[in-house]
Image (cartoon, rainbow, N blue to C red):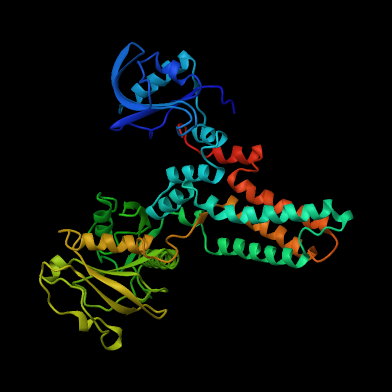
Amino acid sequence: MDLESTIVAVSSATGAGARMIVRMTGPKAVELARTICPPSDSAAVARRELRFDGMRAGAWVYRFIAPRSYTGQDLFEFHLPGNPILAGALVRCLVVAGASVAGPGEFTARALFTGKLDLSQAEGVAAVVSAQNRRQLRAARRLAAGELSRRLAPMTEALADIVTLVEAGIDFADEGIEAISPADARHRLTQLHSDLRELLESSERFERMGGVPSIVLVGRPNAGKSTLLNALCGRPRAVVSSTAGTTRDVLSAEVLLKSGTACLLDMAGIDDAPDAVGGAEDDLAMRRIERRMQELAQQAAATADVVVLVRDATDPRESIKLDRPVDVIVRTKIDLAGPIAFTPSPCTQGEGGGEGSCDKARSPNATPTLTLPLSTGRGDKSADLLAISAITGLGMDALRDRLDRAAFGQSGTSAGEGAMALNARHRLAIESAGAAIERALERVDTSESEWVAAELRAALDELGSITGVVSPDDILGRIFSTFCIGK
């Protein structure tokens, strides 16, 4: 990377918006900024009129003076009206004046090479940009803030001390000087190995946090699943009909919840009616198709992150049986069932696992939610019961909140919420360091000090690769190739 070049790029998201940001950094940033406007003499934000490509545009100009900037070099941000064509024209003008178009992650890479960030923090920046939910965003922000570096710093320092003492003992072996005893070395290495293992066990994989959770709607035909899907999505994604069995295949749509985006799946209705044993050939073929779709619905429920059992409040039949416990039970069409809403209250399971003990009439303005156990074929599970009307909107806010908790966890209180999040590269480096320490422990009581030193040096290199102390070019290339332009 040529740190002597001056780079420029659009740093905001693609497409039109309220504001577009063009970013420029490098040794000639001040000189090139003067070609379009008179920059401030100090680090400041000021309203300026930019002149470029035969146009005039009012913009907010942010100046950051080296080394107190994100990249460690002089840096400018031009905040323009949100027109991509305008931002593109400004970039072309600055390139003609002498700047180069920035590559993926080049701004953050400069921050790394100028010592403003370490490698794990740089990866945290990429993780923040690509976060898909609040939980992942919190983990990414902790990484970008340097939490992993702070956790590894004392371990790296302890390992470096041991390496120094072991290598000193090798250098002065002829003089009979023992810089560190085998017992002391074993004690220190055992503690260090334990600390690394604890870091891995108490951390979560970024990869497990990146997937979009799936929420599947299951229930009898004509229970209101498609109407509920449309209401949650805010648009007519599924065909709605009073005729049972309208949904034949799996319908999916993204729904934006409070903590992130989830994938909502609407399945064909599951009916417990026996297979047809007679009738016309076309009827039998249709019945086989229906049975196959119900099998797929059961399979989707078995693998989904959240299962929502949808029940028609006007349907007196017992609940269908699923192959796994459900997370949320939704009674639909309560606008047709009468002015009854459920409120949070202690509720005991009725005889035989039914819901008869929870049918007390409540105020129509009460929040329609309660909790009771439900038998689902694999044992009882406490499931939230919510009464809603997708047509009138009654209970929909409560349902959205419950789906958010089920898909993303109770914000701020779930187990592991504040745990460190490691990506695959971090985990591999820590595991490799631990393995090298294990091999060193096998020889620490022998006279093979050179082998011990070599293994400990390898472990030190693995830990150093996480923060960038040891950064082969191929590792850097893989990391920064995942960045967005302008970051």
| Up/down of 465 relative to 448, above or below | above
Residue 234 x, y percent position in the rendering: 24, 50
Q: Specify whether residue 84 is in view.
A: yes
Front-lying residue, 225 or 76: 76
Image quarter of residue 363: bottom left
Image quarter of residue 50: top left
Residue 60 x, y percent position in the rendering: 31, 26
Q: Residue at the spot x=52%, y=44% of the render?
A: 123
Front-lying residue, 372 or 354: 372
Q: Specify whether residue 79 is in view.
A: no
Q: Which image quarter is the N terminus in?
A: top right
In this view, the residue farthest toward the bottom is 351
In this view, the residue farthest toward the top is 54
Q: Residue at the spot x=75%, y=64% of the render?
A: 441
Is 190 positioned to the left or the right of 95 in the image? right
Residue 49 x, y percent position in the rendering: 29, 17
Residue 467 x, y percent position in the rendering: 58, 46
Q: Residue at the spot x=29%, y=51% of the render?
A: 237
Front-lying residue, 320 or 65: 65
| Up/down of 426 relative to 477, above or below | below
- Give the mark count: 0
| Up/down of 162 relative to 358, above or below | above
Is 296 positioned to the left or the right of 60 in the image? right
